[in-house]
């Protein structure tokens, strides 16, 4: 038992170390850190600026003005991460935020009306809706294993938690000696730094560039369609929405708890939030033991329970020590939900629409948090402060327990034997692909059996599928070239699909053969969406056709 635990902890620590040993992942994480610190520092400056300009009502209205448009725009902004290179989308989003934050700073310095400053803040929030889905969709391409992907998500969530505390602190200090304009200018500088770091990332990916363009509304809704069509995606997104709904309620109830239930005064709000942050850091050690266990759904479900149960307990028997403990546990739960939920979606969502799936998640997050914040005063009015905590925590716990059994099946993907993964890893075209993408490809292979003498396709036929040989031998007869015999681990059919031309050779089974086939849409999206794989495919085609004819075609 102890040996197994030590082994799993060692594997997890190596996965975390691999995140920073991987140059591209390291740059993405550093860019995220700077971006988060700047974002939360600007939040403090904006809130203070709004309060000085129009009181508490202005603070609430500005928050609402940023939240609702961002929720509406998120699916459309996420489309950029599937239609264009995801790294470029992130860099572009950063540069837009540099301009909008810089403009907000200039507006403060010249004494422009407050609504002008608010407008630039709203534009910054809208640009952020393109950054996050593109980042979530890019990480599986950069990670070299499922464990490294989980570690990258855990690192991102930890950095976000650090930014949540460090950003406001630094922003508050800077605000006390300068002005909101200076904080906005510093934030613009951090966004620029993020863009410069991201520009050095060598890896990149995109969705399916060969997909026929639809109306922008239809394309933006592709993320919703993908989620509705896949039970496992529906379940994860639905439970995530239930947790963020309660998180929205707690944005209000944390203040009520500190001031009304515990009588801690305004500083108590900070103490409870700090306990949440301590819990977020403690979650790192929970993840160390869970990452290599292969049961992300258990971590996800546990995280939701660690949100619900402590809130209900605090409502039943409130005290300061229990409140600090409970909010610390909630911090642990928050990180577990984020890391496990993001990783599950990254591994389940098709790469062609992955950014749009995360755009839906962004909309769900913004919408449910806003709805929860609106409902919180109604719960407090109906049940009292303690009753509201019990209702929120107990309700979330009940939902999680109700869906625990269905959730336990999410980690069971369509069974992908290691032999099929090994076969794909051994091909020149697929070898550069990330492990997550290989798993998705392997799950979509279809088996084809042919008897000796059967023709797979003839020269001049339209390209319909890509093939990998599992066993047996086949002959390939290209026009004007010698016949070639191929066997296990070889592949064929890629030229017609990637060049959109008829078959260039006749392929016949020399013995009884077993093949694995991929539909063209799946094959093209995987190969052309990943630059190293596309380069490998071009090299293979050039060697098969001859450099001159390959260029001509």
Image: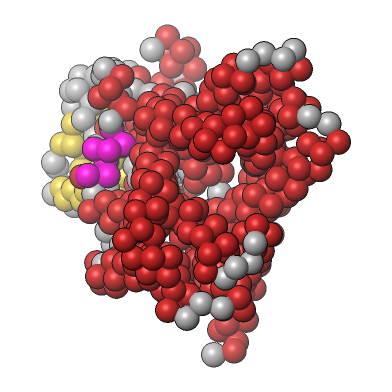
Quick one: which residue is furthest to the top in this view? 552
Residue 219 occupies quadrant: top left
For this rendering, which residue is in front, 294 or 403?
A: 403
Report x, y in % for residue 370.
41, 43
Residue 42 occupies quadrant: top right
Q: Is residue 112 above or below residue 451?
A: above
Residue 465 vs residue 4: left or right?
Answer: left
Name the residue rendered at 41%, 32% in the picture. 68
For this rendering, which residue is in front, 77 or 10?
A: 77
Quick one: which residue is furthest to the right in this view? 177
Report x, y in % for residue 440.
35, 49
Name the residue rendered at 27%, 51% in the picture. 234
Quick one: which residue is furthest to the bottom in this view? 1
Residue 420 occupies quadrant: bottom left
For this rendering, which residue is in front, 51 or 407?
A: 51
Name the residue rendered at 63%, 54% in the picture. 161
Residue 225 vs residue 23: left or right?
Answer: left
Quarter of the image where the C terminus is located: top left
Report x, y in % for residue 477.
28, 29
Main SS type for the magenta part? helix
Q: Is residue 164 above or below residue 200?
A: below
Q: Is residue 267 above or below residue 440?
A: below
Residue 153 vs residue 184: left or right?
Answer: left
Q: Is residue 59 magenta?
A: no
Q: Which residues make up the magenta segment?
A: 222-228
Q: Is residue 127 above or below residue 11?
A: above
């Amino acid at each position: 038992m102890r040996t197994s635990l030590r082994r799993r902890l060692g594997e997890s620590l190596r996965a975390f170390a691999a995140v920073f040993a991987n140059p591209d992942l390291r740059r993405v994480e550093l860019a995220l850190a700077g971006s988060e610190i700047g974002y939360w520092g600007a939040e403090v400056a904006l809130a203070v600026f709004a309060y000085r300009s129009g009181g508490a009502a202005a603070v609430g209205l500005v928050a609402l003005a940023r939240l609702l448009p961002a929720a509406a725009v998120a699916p459309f902004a996420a489309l950029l991460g599937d239609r264009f290179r995801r790294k470029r989308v992130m860099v572009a989003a950063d540069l837009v935020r540099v301009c909008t934050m810089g403009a907000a700073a200039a507006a403060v310095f010249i004494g422009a009306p407050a609504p002008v400053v608010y407008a630039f803040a709203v534009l910054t929030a809208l640009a952020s809706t393109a950054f996050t889905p593109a980042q979530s969709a890019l990480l599986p391409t950069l990670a070299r294993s499922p464990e490294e992907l989980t570690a990258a998500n855990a690192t991102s969530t930890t950095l976000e938690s650090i930014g949540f505390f460090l950003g406001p602190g630094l922003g508050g200090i800077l605000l006390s000696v300068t002005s909101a304009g200076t904080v906005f200018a510093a934030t613009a500088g951090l966004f620029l730094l993020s863009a410069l770091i991201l520009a050095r990332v060598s890896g990149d990916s995109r969705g399916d560039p060969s997909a026929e363009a639809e109306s922008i509304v239809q394309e933006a809704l592709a993320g919703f369609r993908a989620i509705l069509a896949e039970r496992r995606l529906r379940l994860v997104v639905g439970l995530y929405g239930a947790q963020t709904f309660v998180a929205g309620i707690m944005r209000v109830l944390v203040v009520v708890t500190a001031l009304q239930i515990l009588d801690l005064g305004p500083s108590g709000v900070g103490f409870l939030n700090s306990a949440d942050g301590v819990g977020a850091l403690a979650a790192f050690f929970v993840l160390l033991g869970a990452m290599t266990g292969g049961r992300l759904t258990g971590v996800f479900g546990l995280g939701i329970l660690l949100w619900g149960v402590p809130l209900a307990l605090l409502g039943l028997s409130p005290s300061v020590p229990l409140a600090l403990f409970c909010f610390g546990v909630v911090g642990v739960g928050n990180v577990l939900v984020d890391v496990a939920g993001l990783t599950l979606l990254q591994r389940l969502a098709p790469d062609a629409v992955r950014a749009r799936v995360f755009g839906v998640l962004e909309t769900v997050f913004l919408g449910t948090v806003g709805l929860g914040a609106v409902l919180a005063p109604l719960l407090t009015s109906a049940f009292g402060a303690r009753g509201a905590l019990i209702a929120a925590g107990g309700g979330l716990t009940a939902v999680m327990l109700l869906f625990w059994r269905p959730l336990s099946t999410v980690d069971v993907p369509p069974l992908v034997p290691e032999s099929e993964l090994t076969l794909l890893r051994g091909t020149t075209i697929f070898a550069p692909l990330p492990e997550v993408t290989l798993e998705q490809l392997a799950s979509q292979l279809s088996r084809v059996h042919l008897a000796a003498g059967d023709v797979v396709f003839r020269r001049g036929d339209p390209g319909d599928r890509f093939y990998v040989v599992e066993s047996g031998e086949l002959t390939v007869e290209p026009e004007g070239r010698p016949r070639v015999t191929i066997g296990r681990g070889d592949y064929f059919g890629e030229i017609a699909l990637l060049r959109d031309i008829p078959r260039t050779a006749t392929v016949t089974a020399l013995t009884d053969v077993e093949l694995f086939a991929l539909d063209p849409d799946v094959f093209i999206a995987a190969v052309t969406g990943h630059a190293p794989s596309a380069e490998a495919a071009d090299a293979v085609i050039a060697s098969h056709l001859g450099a001159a004819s390959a260029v001509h075609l």
